[in-house]
Amino acid sequence: MAENVSFVKSFFCGVVDKKFYRKLVANLFFVYDYIEKEIDKNKDHKTIKQIYFPELYCKNSLIQDLKYFYG
């Protein structure tokens, strides 16, 4: 827990360890990959229709970040 608090403080100050940041990006990839797939599957549902904006998806940006950090 203390590590997470330290990371958040560093993040907001603009000083982040590259190792920790690339791990965060990798973890976020899996979260957004799942969310975006599920939204696409249900895009015609009456509730999802109201929030369906694929132009806001960020998985592709995360892929670019992963290529940068991991090669």
Image (cartoon, helix red, strand yellow):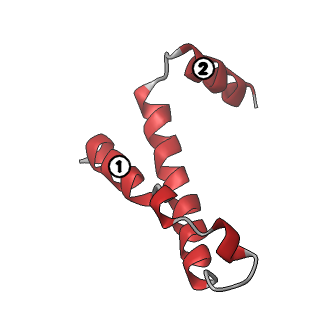
Q: Residue at x 61, y 77 (%)?
A: 38
Instruction: Please say if 44 is above or below 32.
Output: below
Q: Residue at x 64, y 83 (%)?
A: 42
Q: Nearer the viewer, mark 2 or mark 1?
A: 2
Outermost left residue = 71
Instruction: Please say if 34 is above or below 62.
Output: below
Residue 45 numbered tag: none
Identify the residue position indicated by label 2 in the image: 12
Residue type, mark 2 in image: Phe
At which x and y percent is residue 16?
Answer: 49, 22
At which x and y percent is residue 2?
Answer: 74, 25
Q: Are marks 2 and 1 in contact (CB under 8 Å)?
A: no
Front in this rendered view, residue 27 or 64: 64
Q: Quadrant of the N terminus?
A: top right
Relative placement, left or right, of 39 versus 69 is right
| CA distance separating discs 2 and 1 | 21 Å
Residue type, mark 1 in image: Leu
Front in this rendered view, residue 16 or 38: 38
Q: Residues within 10 Å of mark 1 (few under 14, many from 20)?
A: some
Front in this rendered view, residue 32 or 47: 47
Count of number-bearing discs: 2
Identify the residue position indicated by label 1 in the image: 66
Q: Residues within 10 Å of mark 2 (few under 14, many from 20)?
A: few
Q: Secondary structure at mark 2?
A: helix
Q: Residue at x 36, y 55 (%)?
A: 63
**Looking at the rendering, which quadrant does residue 34 occupy?**
bottom right
Relative placement, left or right, of 34 versus 29 is right
Q: Secondary structure at mark 1?
A: helix
Instruction: Please say if 24 is above or below 8.
Output: below
At which x and y percent is residue 28?
Answer: 54, 52
- Which is nearer the N-term, disc 2 or disc 1? 2
